[in-house]
Amino acid sequence: MVDQQYAAELVTNKGKIFTFDAIECLLNFTKEKELTSFAHLLVTDFENPATLIDARNGYYLISENLPSPMGANLTAFSNEQKVRVLQGQKGGAVYTWNELQNYFSSLENRSIIK
């Protein structure tokens, strides 16, 4: 992992684990493979890098002032209040998992990774 604060994992229904350097890599993987069924989607809580959280329950900040390893400026948090505080300091937009997927899906013919 380039930076543990941005790591993500996908665990298939058969138990195979895929690890990613950044959340945007996980998003790209699920989009490219058209994955809708899996055992776990996990992202690292930015404030607690040793803690993986269910990606579907996380809150995400996209801010140019908080760059992620692969360039999407995407950071995950387990707590909405904490992400809102950092948003106030760094700027940017906050998303839920579903909102994040919709946001990246709307970027037509563009890879999430720059």
Image: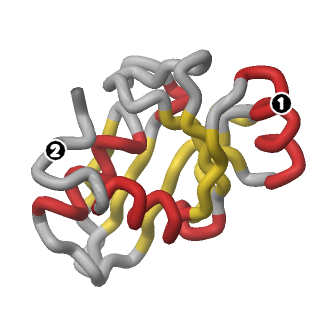
| Mark 1 touches mark 2? (CB < 8 Å) | no
- List the residue tagged with mark 2: 110
Colouring rule applied to residues? secondary structure
| Frontmost residue, 36 versus 95 | 95
The amino acid beneath tag 2 is Arg
Q: Quadrant of the N terminus?
A: top left
- List the residue tagged with mark 1: 88
Label 1 to label 2, Cα distance in Å? 29 Å
| Frontmost residue, 22 versus 51 | 22
Q: Residues within 10 Å of mark 2 (few under 14, many from 20)?
A: few
Q: Quadrant of residue 56?
A: bottom right
* SS at circle 2: loop
Q: Residues within 10 Å of mark 1 (few under 14, many from 20)?
A: few
Please tell me whether residue 107 is drawn above or below residue 93 in the rendered image.
below
Residue at 77 percent of width and 42 percent of height? 83
| Frontmost residue, 90 versus 81 | 90
Residue at 11 percent of width and 51 percent of height? 109
Please tell me whether residue 43 is drawn above or below residue 55 in the rendered image.
above
Is residue 19 among the parts visible in the rendering?
Answer: yes
| Frontmost residue, 29 versus 19 | 29
- The location of residue 88, given as percent across then percent down, is 83, 30
Q: Quadrant of residue 63?
A: top right
- The location of residue 100, given as percent across then percent down, is 47, 58
- The location of residue 76, given as percent across then percent down, is 60, 44
